Amino acid sequence: MSIPMNPRAPAVAANADDDAAIAALRNAFEAQRAAFSSDRAPSLDERRRRLGALCTMLLTYRERIAGALIRDFGSHPVPASDLIEVLGVVGRAQYAMEHLAAWMQPQPRDIDPAMLGTATAMVRPQPKGVVGNIVPWNFPFDLALGPMIDMLAAGNRVMIKPSDYTPACAALLHEMVAATFDPSLVYVAVGGVELARAFAAMPWDHLLYTGNAAIGRDVMTAAAANLTPVTLELGGKCPALFTPGSVTATNVESVIGTKTIKNGQMCVSVDYALVHRGEVAAFVDEAMSYMRDNAPGYSRSADCTGIISTRHLERLEAMLTEAVDRGERVVALEHDGRIDRETRRMPMYLVVDPSPDLRLAREEVFGPILPVLVYDELDEAIDRINADERPLGLYVFGDSPDEIERVIAETTSGGVSVNACALQASLPSLGFGGVGASGMGRHHGVDGFREFSNQRGVVTRGSGDLIASFYAPYAKAEGLVAAVLGGM
């Protein structure tokens, strides 16, 4: 599995260190399996207690979480840490606690009384067992603990592998989880690339991976050896389509404002905008006005999140350099903006009507660069979206319900936000996930509870049925077959 190492991470990839971490991982896995065997169906009260402990943990460590994010990213806005990495997760846990009693109830299913008499059928959600979570670097706490809510709500044991690109966050996550939960319930495995490989290859009862598609394939391959069910959240090139007449200050604010979240380092960020040819100038003007009026000095402020590593920063710079060298129209959205190499803060740019063979047109950008693609007819814009792999998110702007519905109906994506960006990923009640190259499976809310549960079908035989008709000898089934055919 080709998982890249972080050149800034501590030297956790040395053989002795990783061997020890892998041994500890396997011991913790066996301990969790044994604990699950003796407690296969935690009560509603116990599950709520565990979720409540998670909330208390996050609020207790709130300030240290903000500090760890700053150390790993070089710059990270504290209010964003609070909103997304702490309060967003707490809100998701509170929603689960409120609805968990209903989620745990058996769900009746219809039966044919002519065939099965008084039998009953239902789906009874059952914990799967020990669930693994491989966490990306961009939201180190939200994507470690948010899915853990669904996993714990479903009654599972949980093991987490943080990214080695965020060593400070990984160390703090390990500390806070160890202080809050018994390792036989929740365990955080901290280490390098060999640990990551070993983690993916464990015989989990379910495995969640969030990250890029290339490593997602490796994770899925490793999981296949154990027939481990997987949930993959893989991102992709999420488009924002402005239907004709929809370039307004409010709509452009949604796109540019969303790009400022983690400075574009978000799987549901807008990767490119599709704008009608007659409104491109207005789009550029509105984008520049937004940054000038709302975020002056953005790249020099504490509101700008640093790019996670020098290697990632150099990749984004190479994309811009290629566009400039090719004579593309590159628009800086910040007056006197500059890259701060110490904190890796980077200004935001538009690249207007880029050539389709540029890297920024072919690869997921994952940073503060927004390609603005131009179209003449709505058909052309829809075809452009469908020419790419299916994205994790699709954002469509406009006032015409018919046009909006047409875009939704004629495209495929993991989720959609209308006249907004990324909201489909933020609701505790709405299942979140990808489709095709952007992933598989869902978490959040009841969808996440079901994802990490065994949806066990249970049928109880009653009286007055015709089940014996299916047993040899089959002469007695002739009348049943004649009755069924006659009723068609």
Image (cartoon, rainbow, N blue to C red):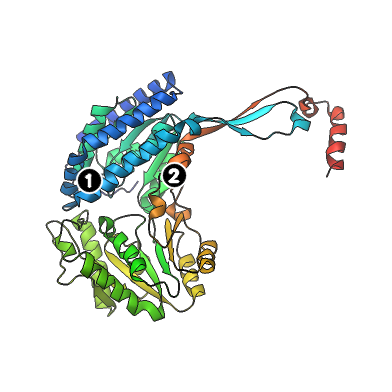
Rendered image quadrant of residue 65: top left
Q: Residue 286's spot in the image, x, y percent?
A: 30, 73
Q: Residue 76's spot in the image, x, y percent?
A: 19, 52
> Do tag 2 and tag 1 residues touch (Cβ < 8 Å)?
no
| Drawn side of residue 416 relative to residue 268, left or right | right
| Residue assigned mark 2 | 429
Q: Quadrant of the C terminus?
A: top right
Residue at image position (36%, 67%) is 251
Pick the residue in front: 28 or 254. Answer: 254
- Residue kind at label 1, given as amino acid type: Thr
Q: Residue furthest left?
A: 342
Going from the N terminus, do you reach mark 2 or mark 1 first? 1
Residue at image position (20%, 34%) is 17
- Residue kind at label 2, given as amino acid type: Ser
Residue at image position (42%, 34%) is 98
| Drawn side of residue 221 relative to residue 59, left or right | right
Rendered image quadrant of residue 244: bottom left
Picture disc at residue 176: none
Of tags 2 and 1, the one toward the viewer is: 2
Q: Residue 34's spot in the image, x, y percent?
A: 39, 21
Q: Badge 1 local density, few (<14 within 10 Å), some, or many (20+)?
A: many
Alpha-carbon span between mark 2 and mark 1: 29 Å
| Residue assigned mark 1 | 166
Q: Is residue 432 above or below residue 16?
A: below
Rendered image quadrant of residue 338: bottom left
